[in-house]
Amino acid sequence: MSELLSATVLAAFLTAIIVQTMPLILAAVGETIGEQSGVLNLGIEGVMLVGAYSGYVTALVTGSPWLGMLGGIAGGVVANLLMLVLNIWLGLNQIVIGLAITLMGEGITAVLYLQNYGKSPQSVPGDAWVIPGLSDLPVVGPSLFRQSGIFWVLLLTLVVVAFLLARTNWGLSIRAAGQKPSSLDAAGGNVVRTRSSAVLLNGAFVGAGGAFLSVLTTGTFTPFMTGGLGFIAIVITMLSRGRVAWIVVTSLLYGIAVAIKNPLQLIGVTVPADVFQMLPFIVVMLTLIIFARSSMVPPALGAPYTRGAR
């Protein structure tokens, strides 16, 4: 009986790690695409909230988590249009625009939610793929092979993006736009077009991260539900040096710090709730302190590009 209970607790722990980590991975991958092209988006906290709210509403209206994820992606792209127009096209300051996007995303989603759903909160429908045989494996089966099909599609997407960034001409153009945009321009590339596509992809992935959080992780939306997740994604991005594999590893540390609460309580460890809320941020800060020297950002990060300017 105790062995069965231990297996159940461990399976629940692994499940919690997965659902807590995936939104952060998606947001950090989106930020990585943007930063590698030279665009620092401090607004991804707001973009995540827009994606979370639009995904939540779409899933409620359609009854489909899949369409909810598409709604979150669309919301993230729309939220990033402000960065696209004001920074990429008009050359205004990225930091100011990013902070404005965060404030707007937080305020707009909070007002819309309280106006439309504050008096009658609702949960979105669940979605799970049970993979025959593998789902019956002890511990790993219930936690990994009974996830939503959305999880597997996103996992495959991350593998594809990692390959494209590292091994294709598109990835080379993205990195050139952030390393030395004048060289990309001289080689016949279009810096504005490259950065524009990166910003839109940034919005898509960050919006997907927000939608995953509301549609699959919690099943609902609450104002300011990201709780600083977007800013943590920025830190992880800078530490990962453009490598998706490092994003996954670092994000797992955050997921473990968030999910450790229930197992510790079940084995009788009494820790104040405030400590559990602080723990993920403590882990991120320690990671930043330890690996800060090895972090690297593109030289042209944050600098608008004007063709012909020196």
Image (tube, rainbow, N blue to C red):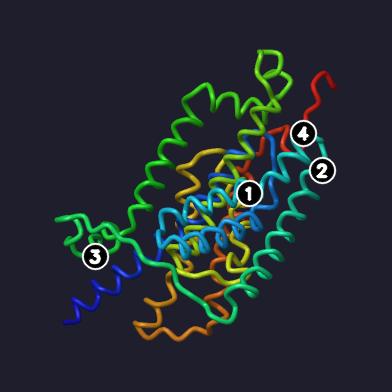
State the quadrant of the C terminus. Answer: top right
Q: Name the front one of labels 3 and 4.
A: 4
- Look at the numbered disc 3 and give the secondary structure of its residue: loop
Q: Amino acid at mark 4?
A: Trp
Choose the circle earlier in sequence order: 1 or 4: 4
Choose the circle earlier in sequence order: 3 or 2: 2
Q: Amino acid at mark 3?
A: Val
Choose the circle earlier in sequence order: 2 or 1: 2
Q: Amino acid at mark 1?
A: Ala
Residue under pointer 2: 93
Choose the circle earlier in sequence order: 1 or 3: 3
Residue under pointer 3: 139
Tell how many labels: 4
- Look at the numbered disc 4 and give the secondary structure of its residue: helix
Q: CA distance from mark 1 to mark 4?
A: 32 Å
- Look at the numbered disc 2 and give the secondary structure of its residue: loop
Q: Nearer the viewer, residue 163 or 46?
A: 46
Above or below, 54 against 98 in this view is: below
Along the horizontal axis of the image, is 124 left or right of 8?
Answer: right
Residue located at (57% from left, 40% from top): 201
Q: Name the front one of labels 3 and 2.
A: 2
Residue under pointer 1: 292
